Image (cartoon, helix red, strand yellow):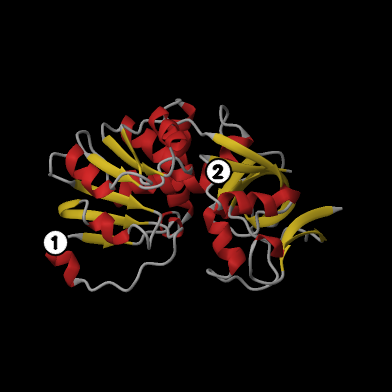
Amino acid sequence: MVHAIRVREYGGPQVMKWETIDVPVPGPDQALIRQTAIGLNFLDTYHRSGHYPEPLPFSPGNEGAGIVEAIGPGVTTVKPGDRVAYAGVIGAYAETRVIPAAKLVVIPNGVTDQQAAAMMLKGMTAEYLVRRTYRVKPGDTILIHAAAGGVGLIVCQWAKHLGATVIGTVGTDEKAALAKAHGCDHPIVTAREDFIARVAEITDGKKLPVVYDSIGKDTFMKSLDCLAPFGLLAAFGQSSGGVEPLNIGVLAAKGSLYVTRPTLGTYIATPALLAETARDLFDVVGKGIVKIAINQTYPLKDAVQAHIDLESRKTTGSTIFTV
């Protein structure tokens, strides 16, 4: 008997139910995987609440890892027995699932299933942010909001390795210590510090070439005030809510600024892009440059509690479900 978390109506964490499901035989270009670990992301709460609606009923979840148990006609990239991982394919909150084989990458030796499940979505997001959206260079000073979160801790480590000075916002002293331990040179506790003033102080008034902002409504306009002329705001999430409509004249007034709203789906839209992005991520993790902090683990059937803790800002780093 196979179980999954199912959502039959949009709402708070309690709308998620632990149910038995039927798993189909993999069709053409599909693979059946028995999942061993599943990642938790803030994106999952958007789908559950209906902020990013999915056709009802559905299983939340966007990343996971497991073992290929069967493949459909035409599949040549994976085979039964392979350890594989994926990101960006909704339906992860299940013990077993069928998935397009083109969305799977084989997990290399030296990376565990748990690490892969914890880092695919967050790690590949960090990869495109620091390597492609704005290519971090030695000598840069950057700002990452939510520096103690899953993406934040990876960005801190990766950007530091690339030669940047890293500034990060956090909510508590405990999170500040965690961010600092992962490469954040200047953690800013926003409960008592004005991050605009601190950025100006740290940079001697020069400000920044880039701000990575996953918070959205509460930080967007303030993030613009942290940018030097021609700087880029990469708004890759909105945990505090959507950003209000923007008069683009503001960008001119604040120094000919740039704003982008990137998504992982675009950056891994083809098998070649997916393979390149995953390879870059696996490389830095395998070499120990980036360490994946799995700070919370829940049984999949306890997804309700996991969502409550995530939305209450009680979690740090990455969280996984065990199956």
Residue 24, above or below 163: below
Residue 201's quadrant in the figure?
top left
Image x and y of residue 81, in percent: 71, 39
Which amino acid does the dot numbered 1 rest on? Ser
Any part of residue 52 in sight: yes
> Which mark identifies residue 162?
none
Q: Residue at x 58, y 55 (%)?
A: 62
Helix, strand or loop for disc 2? loop
Residues at marks 2 and 1, CA–CA distance in whole angstroms: 37 Å
Residue 115 lies left or right of residue 5; in this view the side is: left
Residue at the image point whose x is 38% and y is 30% from the top: 180
Q: Earlier in the sequence, mark 2 or mark 1?
A: 1
Q: Secondary structure at mark 1?
A: loop
The one nearer the camera, 289 or 106, is 289
| Residue nearer the viewer, 178 or 209 | 178
Would you say residue 36 is visible in this rendering?
A: no
Kindly identify which residue carries mark 1: 256
x, y percentage for residue 90? 60, 60
Nearest to the observer: residue 295 or residue 308: 308
Pinpoint residue 269: horizontal percent, then vertical percent.
45, 58
Bin the neighbour count of mark 1 within 10 Å (Cα to Cα): few under 14, some 14-19, many 20 and up: some
In the foreground, 190 or 23? 190
Q: Residue at x 56, y 51 (%)?
A: 312
What mark, if any, has residue 315 been given in the picture? Answer: 2
Q: Give the side of residue 308 with respect to residue 254, left or right.
A: right
Quadrant of the image occupied by residue 176: top left
Amino acid type of disc 2?
Answer: Thr
Lateral position of residue 315 relative to residue 195, left or right: right
